[in-house]
Image (cartoon, rainbow, N blue to C red):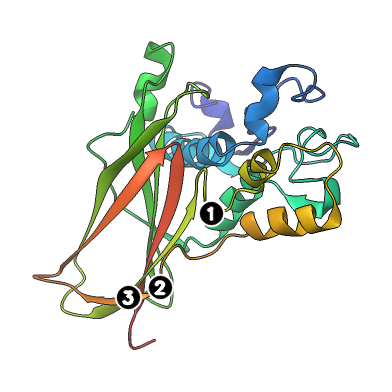
Amino acid sequence: MAAFPSLEGIECLADECDASVPAHHGRFDNSDFDYRNTEYFPVFQCSLMKKLLDLKEAESANLRAATAWAFYIEGERCFEGTRSLITYGDLDKPVLNAYRLLGKLGRWRLRATSSAAWPVQLIDDTEAVPEEVDVLATRSDDGRVSALVWRRADDQYLREEERTVRVRARGLGSAAFLVRQWRVDATHGNSYQSWCLLGAPDYPTEPQVEEMAGAGQLRPVAPDRLERGVGGELIVDLSLPLPAVCLVELVPADR
């Protein structure tokens, strides 16, 4: 659109904005489509939305919104239905937690950079992103500062141990903040991994569904802690496996 002056200013919509093609195939058709159920997909979606925002800033096209197709294509067995946010027993899939994390971000975007990011301008020049750590930061009207941080690679089967990722927030003055963290990975906010640990039953029992539902809830990964910036700077160290996405919230203590 940016290449055509007559389209300048016209709002556009990025539809079907996810990796699920073809829509009607799932894990029982081809095991490669199992990524829709794993922690890979929520991390992918967070990265995708940030890359779209970056592209919007770099181009003159007026991107108004991006939507993911999230209807339910029927499948009786657990984690069989495709392109869906829920599965058997009304279980939340991990990807639903990605949208919950995005929904917690503030209204105003803040400038944020990562020394391990793969810029959107380079995507067309490579066959696959080997690994990246990137960030999307925002500020809310109530003064809350949020940083959505993820570690991912294009290879859906690549799994690695945790590594330290340092989040450095500047310009905070001497104010005190409550630090809160939310995470989605193999062991947090992940009903699918709980299902696998239960033996991947096609038709889980009611107690099994309850156990998976609890494992799939998005919860803070640690108790809130009070931190005060030093020289206007506050540092939060994360330990992220591959893949993983973590939301760091800095909530003004006086709020």
Task: Give the left or right position of residue 74, taking residue 5 as reference.
Answer: right
Q: Identify residue for label 3.
A: 225
Q: Nearer the viewer, mark 3 or mark 1?
A: 3
Q: Are marks 2 and 3 in contact (CB under 8 Å)?
A: yes
Residue drawn at the location 76% of the way across and 59% of the way down: 210
* In the depicted structure, whether residue 67 falls above or below residue 210: above
State which quarter of the image contains the N terminus. Answer: top right
Dividing the picture into quadrants, the one containing residue 70 is top right
Q: Residues within 10 Å of mark 2 (few under 14, many from 20)?
A: few
Q: Are marks 1 and 2 in contact (CB under 8 Å)?
A: no
Q: Which residue is mark 2?
A: 223
Residue 55: x %, y % from top left: 44, 33
> Among all residues in the image, which is located at the extreme left?
231
- Which circle's residue, 1 or 2, is located before the other in the chain? 1
Is residue 168 in view? yes
Residue under circle 1?
102
Q: Amino acid at mark 1?
A: Leu
- Please report the residue visible at 57 percent of the width from the left and 49 percent of the height from the top: 98
| Left or right, residue 163 beside residue 62 | left
For the image, the number of numbered tags is 3
